[in-house]
Image (cartoon, rainbow, N blue to C red):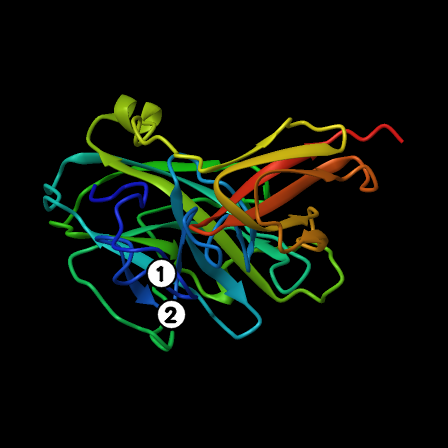
């Protein structure tokens, strides 16, 4: 599989969508799937669809599986290095996590899967009919917004397939949806995707962990985590901005400017729980999870 965990890139994603031309090998097939990388302050881990860290490495992609517009779907795909051999059995695995925020991302679906084809297609407006079939897919609604869920399956190649495409390939009449209640009416469903493996080896496909040697360089560090409310921050370059978001994506703390290499913030006024930090220095922005155990 080329670029199986979306690590290889040309530049840093700066806007939505920013998959084509930035994430190597992967392209948009239907509508506008997205690319996320820790280097980006816009398309990073705390993004417009929710918050998620990669299953491995520093990057992942994402796509719409349902929206209030009829049959709205996003598909992304990649050209396989070697075309599949007819009659041979293949094993496919990939990981997804549902997006969720305090806005329109509040629905989850089933039928997330992969379609193998002998051709590519480009449907930016999503006007082509959906095939209502897929090579591998799950009938279970994937509801987890915190952890990565493995989707896997096997198939006998009945054609010399050259493309692997990810998404939901069934129309609204052939999928199930579930509303994750927030303060908005049900609108749309979005999934993050990472670590795609296609192999003739079932054991390899099951145990494959993608990249093993990518090391995240942290020019910004924050500690302790979990924290009792006092968070210390160190940076190789001057800290410019500190933002803390709650689990609903709401901004609950902001300090700007800071203009220090080392800084300490007091979060004892916030309730115990899980938060997301976004800390920027003069070079880049780092997003991380933070657990607060405030004793008040």
| Horizontal side, residue 186 vs residue 267: left or right | left
> Badge 1 local density, few (<14 within 10 Å), some, or many (20+)?
many
- For image coordinates 27% across by 50% down, the residue present is 9
Q: Are marks 1 and 2 in contact (CB under 8 Å)?
A: yes
Q: Is residue 177 visible?
A: no
Quarter occupied by the N terminus: top left
Residue 182 numbered tag:
none
Lower position in the chain sequence, tag 1 or tag 2 = 2
Quarter occupied by the C terminus: top right
| Horizontal side, residue 163 vs residue 137: left or right | left
> Badge 2 local density, few (<14 within 10 Å), some, or many (20+)?
some
Kindly indicate the quadrant of the structure image that contains residue 27. bottom left
Element under disc 2:
loop
Kindly indicate the quadrant of the structure image that contains residue 228. top right
User: Residue at label 1?
Assistant: 75
- Nearest the viewer among 94 and 40 is 40
User: Residue at label 2?
Assistant: 31
């Amino acid at each position: 599989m080329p670029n199986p965990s979306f690590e290889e890139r040309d530049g840093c994603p700066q806007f939505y969508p920013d998959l084509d031309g930035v994430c190597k090998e992967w392209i948009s097939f239907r509508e506008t799937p997205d690319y996320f990388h820790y280097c980006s302050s816009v398309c990073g881990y705390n993004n417009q669809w929710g918050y998620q860290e990669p299953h491995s490495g520093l990057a992942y992609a994402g796509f719409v599986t349902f929206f209030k517009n009829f049959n709205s779907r996003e598909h992304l795909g990649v050209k396989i290095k070697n075309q599949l051999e007819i009659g041979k059995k293949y094993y496919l695995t990939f990981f997804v996590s549902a997006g969720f925020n305090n806005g329109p991302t509040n629905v989850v679906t089933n039928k997330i899967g992969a379609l193998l084809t002998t051709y590519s297609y480009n449907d930016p407006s999503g006007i082509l009919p959906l095939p209502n079939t897929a090579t591998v897919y799950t009938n279970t609604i994937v509801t987890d917004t915190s952890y990565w869920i493995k989707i896997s399956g096997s198939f006998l190649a009945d054609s010399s397939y050259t493309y692997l495409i990810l998404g939901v390939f069934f129309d609204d009449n052939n999928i199930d949806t579930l509303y994750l209640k927030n303060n908005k009416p049900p609108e749309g469903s979005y999934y993050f995707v990472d670590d795609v493996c296609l192999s003739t080896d079932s054991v390899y496909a099951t145990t494959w962990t993608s990249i093993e040697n990518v090391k995240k360089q942290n020019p910004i560090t924050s500690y302790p985590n979990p924290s009792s409310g006092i968070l210390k921050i160190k940076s190789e370059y001057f800290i410019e901005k500190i933002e803390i978001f709650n689990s609903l994506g709401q901004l609950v703390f902001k300090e700007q400017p800071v203009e220090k290499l080392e800084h300490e913030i007091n979060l004892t006024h916030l309730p115990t729980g899980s938060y997301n930090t976004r800390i920027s220095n003069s070079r880049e922005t780092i997003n991380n999870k933070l657990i607060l155990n405030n004793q008040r």
